[in-house]
Amino acid sequence: MKFTSLSKMIGGAAVLAATAATPALAVDLQFYFPVAVGGSAAQTIESLTKTYEAAHPDVHIKPVYTGSYTETVAKAITAARGGNPPQLAVIGAAEMFNLIDENIVVPFDGYVSKQEAKAWFGGFYPAFMANSQAFGKTWGIPFQRSTPVMYWNKDAFKKAGLDPNQPPKTWGELVTDAQKLTVRNADGKVTQWGVRIPTAGFPYWLYQGLAIPAGVTLASKDGTQVNFDSPAAVKAAQFMLDLTTRYKVMEPGTLDWGTTPKAFFTGNAAIIWTTTGNLTNITKNAPFPFGVGFLPADKHFGAPTGGGNWYLFKKSTAEQKQAAVKFVQWMTAPTQAAKWTMATGYVAPRPADWDTPALKAYVKKVPGALVAREQLKYAGPELTVYQNARVTQILNNALEAIMSGQKQPAPALKQAQAQADAVLRPYQQ
Amino acid sequence: MRRETLHAWLLLLPAAVLLASFTHIPAIETVVNSFFSTARGMRPSHFVGLGNYRNLIADPTFWQAMRNNLLYAAITIPLSMGIALAMALLVRGRIGGRGFLRMAFFTPTVLPLIAVANIWIFFYTPGFGLLNQIGALFGLPNMNFLGQGATALYAVAAVSVWKEAGFFMIFYLAALQTIPPSLIEAARLEGASSWHVFRRVTLPLIMPTTLFISVNAVINAFRLVDQVFVMTQGGPDNASTLLFYYIYQVGFQFWDTAYAATLTVVMLAILVAIAIGQFFLLDRKVHYR
């Protein structure tokens, strides 16, 4: 009897204390985030959120880990269709038109003053904003953004009689270097390939590392047109195929993404192309000195961007939106961006981020991180159109058919263009 | 009598509610949705009649997925069942290390398919992958199993056979142990050879199990696609796309939910037809006791 009343009193006190600690007008926020790289991405997001909550007791924020990029966008759209979306989500930048078309996101412009907007949106690298803005509004805030770079094995370069500090800078040099780097045994079997560009699953991304230097942006700015069958696009696909069949410096068939770093470590491939997100992994595991460089140039240097942006969801109160935008502003501020970049290998998306003492110290230790930043000057947006997944799949199928020898580049891309046109026709008024 | 009926219905109610809300109503909704267009943002969905079905007939990816799935079923079902029976016969008798063998055969079933598929990627990897390294010992050329249209589907099918055979073995093992030894001894006394005993005594007696396994194998051939997600994402150029994977892609990547519903209806129809066929046709050859 006594015990119950005592516990009731304690319980009552706890409730009182809890109410006292929380201001009457606390705002609850929830956001979805994917994890696409190894390392401590999820822990970093959670600890950053906790830091913010501690400094802002009037806001409760619940981060929800939602799997891969594909799963995250699927969950966010499902939740929005069910009438219960999160206030924020980190979703692929290329999904912008899709989310606008679903009518479930709102631009950030309405929640910051004109000057603030100019300073905030204008502070990011233009390459990242290219697929974050549409119709004069900003729909996505760059957060976990990446770009592909070239990694080369310096020991293999020495063995082949090449200067280990001079990576190939043009397509022509890539071919001649790769020919020297391709090693065959007595039976003519290849024991080391010159170059490896992974082309299985989603070849469209690295293909743009050839298409952009060849002089073509695959999609129009308004996301309603694609240029799959332009001469430059065909030229880029032909070059990718030639690496396997004509120059014989790359393993034929499509090549898996996940096993690419492993192929590099075991000496199966002397040059690989992959995301900057692999920098931490390769730094830790490569048993030889390696270099990080730009993707080689054709007409000029170039690479696609990739990765995720913050999106603001429509169905929430004005208060929640205001609080959500404040949170995103804080998450993308230089101090937090620096922490995030060091934990994951993503490219810090603003010049100001790179001026923080933390990142300055980091690039001294990992100079490869700078390469991605420098390459951004030449980078273009990755394919971003309406019905993005479907159009991307059309291009993926064409590229896989080319790389596995089932179709020639020109007819395959012509067919892909026709298929994409059919999907995009309703959006071209 | 009335009261009993009422009781019966009350007892059935929990199961009925669950089945209805998670199976029957969604199935009916799927059929209904297949006659409407997909709603997109500002444009609400509207009735299109058989429009989605006309698109389906004209969709080359659908036909490719169907062809792939039939080939996949034709490979995985007989192979996994045959291997399962062979393994069961092997570990039934008194042989050394029987417990270890049984465990080894069953292990693939316990492992999660996603994890297993990630390991198989490394087996198949060209150059330094396990299979190519073994092949190199015998002077075989380098093979890019998952990266060639001609081999990708077979490579994916091999993983399913490896995964399923151990599971089916357990059922065969249980069935084999229920066969009365007296029947086999009687056959032996009549002078029947081992093969004859197997064909005339063992095989007919395990027919109910075979039917059960084959129904499961057929369903799995259409249902288990996890390894496609991990290993090939349906590529290269849809060479390893299976029907269920295509439904996922259309529904949850392209967000064309109406067309995904149409594909689902077709898949349901196929599965129902096969299940009915199996029960009615095979039933005549099955001896239940």
Image: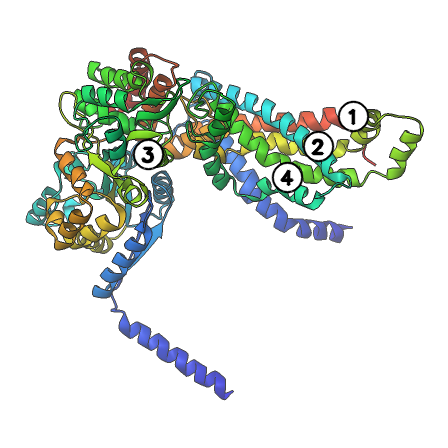
Q: Which residue is mark 4?
A: B105
Q: CA distance from mark 1 to mark 4?
A: 32 Å
| Chain hosting mark 4 | B
Q: Which residue is mark 3?
A: A264
Local SS, label 3 = helix
Residue at coordinates 19% horizontally, 34% vertically from top-left? Answer: A293
Checking the image for residue B284, the label placed there is 1
Q: Are marks 3 and 1 in contact (CB under 8 Å)?
A: no
Instruction: Mark 2: give few (<14), some (14-19) or many (20+) Cα within 10 Å.
Output: many
| Chain hosting mark 3 | A
Residue A52 sits above or below residue B135 on the image: below
**Foreground disc of the pair 4, 3:** 3
Residue B288: image location, x then y, percent: 81, 34
Local SS, label 2 = helix
Residue A347: image location, x then y, percent: 20, 42
Q: Nearer the viewer, residue A197 or B114?
A: A197
Residue A202: image location, x then y, percent: 34, 29
Residue at coordinates 12% horizontally, 34% vertically from top-left? Answer: A377
The amino acid marked with disc number 1 is: Arg
